[in-house]
Amino acid sequence: MREVSDFIMAGMTLEQLRIFLAVAEHLHFTRAAEGLYITQPAVSAAIHSLETEYRVKLFHRIGRHVEITEAGELLQIEAQKILEQVGLTERGLRELNNLQRGELKLGSSLTIGNYWLPEKISQFQRQYSGIMVNCTLANTEEICLGTANGQFDLGLIEGEVKPSLQKLLNQEEIGSDRLLIVVGQSHPWFAREQVDLAELKNTDWVMREPGSGTQQRLEEALQNWGINLNELKVILVLNTGEMVKSVVEEGHVAAGISELMVKKELKLGLLKAIRIIDYRQDFDQELELIRPFLKIKHCQRFQTQISQTFEKMLLLNDINI
């Protein structure tokens, strides 16, 4: 273990910042020391050195209880930024060796991640076998937030970026997908070829949760067709497309779901896609739900060579759906 003398120095060091953040996280000097595998006096010395150097109090020590001060909260925010940037810089330096090592952090909304992305990741890793790909699946809102705060190098989403994040995130359309209105074999519409737009209000529905790209696009389409979501009889709200698909197969409900997700079930006759016709027009118009697929990345965060290479691969191949 490192000793007290190792941390008695002038100026601010990365090691001092790491120690400070550990204390700020645990609000306990001994637990911070244990997590960093250093001595408790070394932790105290590092904090004391920072407080002395900059003439501020970072923590209130009340008996055995520790509270962070206003100055400590400021340093906590800035220290996290500094260490994150250092980490990104280190990653960039390691990647200079012909992409032989490193990590790609992806965030993907559920439909893309489950039905399209695995093939692309496999293609990338065949070319760059030393790169570890870490992919998180979540709904569109969570992927946007994760890309904005640096959790992901790239995000792939099916919905819209919230206005509050649009200045932070670059967006590029890389394909499109169709949403289908589907029903199962026991639904009265299964035997029909088409349904009038007005009839959408006459059946039970299962929907995705708020924040889902599928749900965003479905609500937009309904509004464009003159139907408010509140006019539909929504009996279930679920947080994955697979759950929605299973409920539709077994029940008497309708749902808006990605064509990618139900190709097999449509072919087997377990589900049926319903043509929606608007009879209000002078001619019978079939209504479609088309949604773009977007690639997003932070406008200002450092983009690693690995991230740039994967991004180019996506643009060269497109999303053919």
Image (cartoon, rainbow, N blue to C red):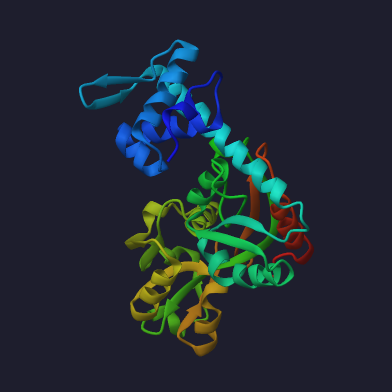
Question: Residue 278 sits in which quadrant?
Answer: bottom right
Residue 38 versus residue 127 in the image, above or below: above
Residue 81 versus residue 205 in the image, above or below: above
Seen as rendered, the residue at the extreme bottom is: 268
Camera-side residue of 208 and 309: 309
Task: Provide residue 25's location: percent of width, then percent of height.
Answer: 37, 35
Res 282 seen here: no
Task: Provide residue 232's location: percent of width, then percent of height.
Answer: 38, 59
Camera-side residue of 172 and 247: 172
Q: Residue at x 38, y 55 (%)?
A: 231
Task: Provide residue 239's location: percent of width, then percent of height.
Answer: 39, 61
Residue 264 versus residue 228 in the image, above or below: below
Q: Tell me if 176 is positioned left or right of 61 in this view.
A: right
Camera-side residue of 282 and 103: 103
Q: Tell me if 303 is positioned left or right of 115 in this view.
A: right
Camera-side residue of 154 and 28: 28
Q: Residue at x 52, y 21 (%)?
A: 9
Residue 100 versus residue 210 in the image, above or below: below
Q: Residue at x 74, y 64 (%)?
A: 318
Which quadrant does the N terminus fall into? top left
Task: Provide residue 249's location: percent of width, then percent of height.
Answer: 39, 80
Question: Residue 315 sits in which quadrant?
Answer: bottom right
Res 52 seen here: yes
Total tally of numbered discs in the picture = 0
Which quadrant does the C terminus fall into? bottom right
Seen as rendered, the residue at the extreme top is: 55
